[in-house]
Amino acid sequence: MSGTDETPQTEAEKLGGAGPTDTRPTGTRTSAPEPEPEAPSRTHSMLREIASGNALAGVLAVVLAIAVGSLMIALTDERVRDTASYVFARPGDFFTATWDAVWGAYTALFRGAVYNDRVDDFATQIRPLTDTLKFAGPLIAAGLGVGLAFRAGLFNIGGRGQMLLAGAAAGWVAFAFDLPMVIHLPLAILAGSLAGALWAGIAGVLKARTGAHEVIVTIMLNYVGFYLVFFMLSRQGLLQAPGSGNPKSSPAKESAILPDILGERFNLHLGFVLALVAVAYVWWLLNRATLGYRIRAVGENPSAARAAGIDVGRTYIVVMLIAGALVGLAGTNQVLGTVTSGVTVDLDAGIGFDAITVALLGRSRPLGILAAGLLFGAFKAGGFAMQASEGIPVDIVLVVQSLIVLFIAAPPLVRAIFRLPAKEAK
């Protein structure tokens, strides 16, 4: 045994192999790192954002409603039912009759709502479009009132009562005073909007002070408003026209009538312009004003908004006042739209409830409500033409509108049918 300490060699070192740190089997190669997945392209990301967004789902809800409406049009057509009795013998007759019924109905709807190509006069050809805009005016204004409340987390379904009180106030100013138009018309519009604001403000105050649910309150206020206006229209000296036994007021004086925009040949009047002004105001309010920030914050999370120093109760009151004024503008539009009109208990014409659909379809966004109001205005204008020229029941249009609400209320169903991606959580 020598005096020199030698480090004992491992078996691998004796055989000329690698040191103890190299444990790889002989002949093994180092594998390359797996490539990272490529980031989606900008175009792909944009398309996915569109496909998962609410706007496309709303459009597809309309498409689905029209498709189901087409089925109902076919089922109500007499020729389709006749050809269905021998569909297996001559299927071509059945499909031709079905196509003719559906195509005829929707082309008639288009001719009655947008452009009538069956006449030679250009003014008469575009008159359906002006009718659509006329019907859309109050729908847009009332839809803005409902949509603004939605943005604050409130469900304003008291449109009928607000329109009735607004129409009664505007109509009374319109026939009770003799004033120049520059004073009379703005005064009547202001009176109507103020009445609608105060009527909706009742629900806002009760919500803020007592916690009363605005749905119950606004429903009850609809009934109260209806019978209150009916009472005033049934009593001489209040709203009832002198010498009349019917529940109707005197017509508005010409100085308080909304003037025509394109002349007497068309029914389009200043009410549509006022609706556009209301769209611009609500857009500015929600996107540029401090109050709009508070409204959106309260709508997203009232508790967090309260913790941030926002007076939630006061915001509820202000929102309902503004919403009522917007819905009141729709009621004013109905009363002051024509010289022969007056205040009646039917002046809302279902607009108070249609406004809920418009607000839902427009996703409570001002521009979306504008587009939805135009669509429903087209339904109203074209539905009568569809019934007159094709014999299709006008109730089919109401069915289509109801189906739109149904599909909008069930976005997962729409996404499943069209295989749309779900919106990614941020």
Image (cartoon, rainbow, N blue to C red):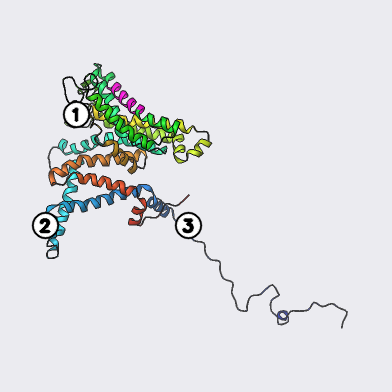
Up/down of 147 relative to 91, above or below: above
Highlighted range, magenta:
185-198
Whether residue 296 is visible = yes
**Number of residues whose C-alpha sits closer than 10 Å to that of mark 2, classed few (under 14), some (14–19) or many (20 or more):** few
Going by the numbered disc 2, the residue's amino acid type is Asp
Q: Which badge, 1 or 3, comes first in the chain's sequence?
A: 3
Residue 161, picture quadrant: top left
Q: Which secondary structure, mark 2?
A: helix
**Number of residues whose C-alpha sits closer than 10 Å to that of mark 3, classed few (under 14), some (14–19) or many (20 or more):** few
Up/down of 131 relative to 392, above or below: above
Q: Which secondary structure, mark 1?
A: loop
Which residue is identified by label 1?
Answer: 263
Q: Residue at x 37, y 55 (%)?
A: 420
Where residue 241 appears, as percent x and y from the top left, is 19, 22
Q: Which badge, 3 or 2, comes first in the chain's sequence?
A: 3
- The residues tagged by marks 3 and 2 sit, at their Cα atoms, a distance apart of 58 Å
Q: Residue at x 23, y 20 (%)?
A: 175
Which residue is identified by label 3?
Answer: 39
**In the rendered view, does 420 fall on the left or right side of 347?**
right
- The residues tagged by marks 1 and 3 sit, at their Cα atoms, a distance apart of 58 Å
Quick one: 360 or 133, which is closer to the camera? 360
Where residue 62 appears, as percent x and y from the top left, is 29, 48
- Mark sitting on residue 82: 2
Going by the numbered disc 3, the residue's amino acid type is Ala
The prevailing secondary structure element of the residues shown in magenta is helix
**In the rendered view, does 83 fall on the left or right side of 56?**
left
